[in-house]
Image (cartoon, rainbow, N blue to C red):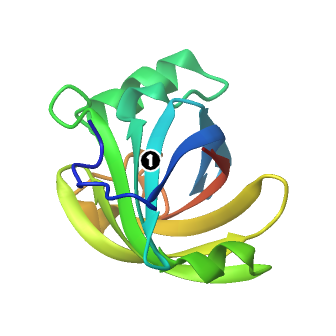
Amino acid sequence: MFLLIMHPAGAKDLSLSHAKAEYTVTHIFKTVKGVSIDLKGKMVCENKKCEFLVAIGSKSFVSSDSNRDLNLQTILEVTKYPLIMVKGTLSEADLSKDQFDVPSKVSFHGIEKEYTLKIKRSEPFSGQLTLLLEDHNVERPSLLMAKIDNEVPVHFNFDWKE
């Protein structure tokens, strides 16, 4: 479903495991965090190169306020854009480094943009990227006539298993 690649002998298939993504939205009066554990992904390593694809359900993020979560789902048009997708390529050697960057394409709210994932090798892997809402045509909600910040840091933890 995620990667449609022919796998000759010697290719290594890995699946995403123990994955979690967390966003932080900042407003002058409040900071809100939302978490999703609904991440699916696959990575195929062959000839010292690994390609991966991760999908996150757009409506799977939950914060401490279900009303706010429903409002977010409306803003993100989750029925029209049900998945957030991240895909990229890295060298197999990167997976054994303490830290590495992965140029990736993020498809969010129907728009694909390039970002750099900052990855740290730990148990499990951890990383982050900062989404720019306006780059993805997301209308920034406002409270008392002040909009939330355009930059939304997304932190994630994950592992790969064979």
Asked which secondary structure carries label 1, the reply is strand
Q: Is residue 11 above or below residue 124?
A: below
| Most distant residue in the top direction | 66
At 80% across and 79% down in the image, what residue appears? 98
**Label 1 belongs to which residue?**
42
Q: Position of residue 37 (x, y in %)?
A: 59, 31
Which quadrant is the C terminus positioned in? Answer: top right
Q: Is residue 18 left or right of residue 153?
A: right
Q: Position of residue 49 (x, y in %)?
A: 45, 77
Which quadrant is the N terminus positioned in? Answer: top left
Q: Disc 1 residue type?
A: Lys
At 60% across and 22% down in the image, what residue appears? 65
Q: Position of residue 21 (x, y in %)?
A: 60, 45
Q: Is residue 37 above or below residue 105?
A: above
At 23% across and 54% down in the image, what residue appears? 6
Pick the front one: 119 or 147: 119
Asked if one can make out residue 150 in the rendered structure from this viewpoint, the answer is no
Question: Which quadrant would residue 86 be assigned to in this image?
Answer: bottom left
Pick the front one: 131 or 65: 131
| Most distant residue in the front direction | 9
| Most distant residue in the right direction | 123
Q: Position of residue 145 (x, y in %)?
A: 41, 52
The residue carrying pointer 1 sits among few (fewer than 14), some (14 to 19) or many (20 or more) residues within 10 Å by Cα, namely many
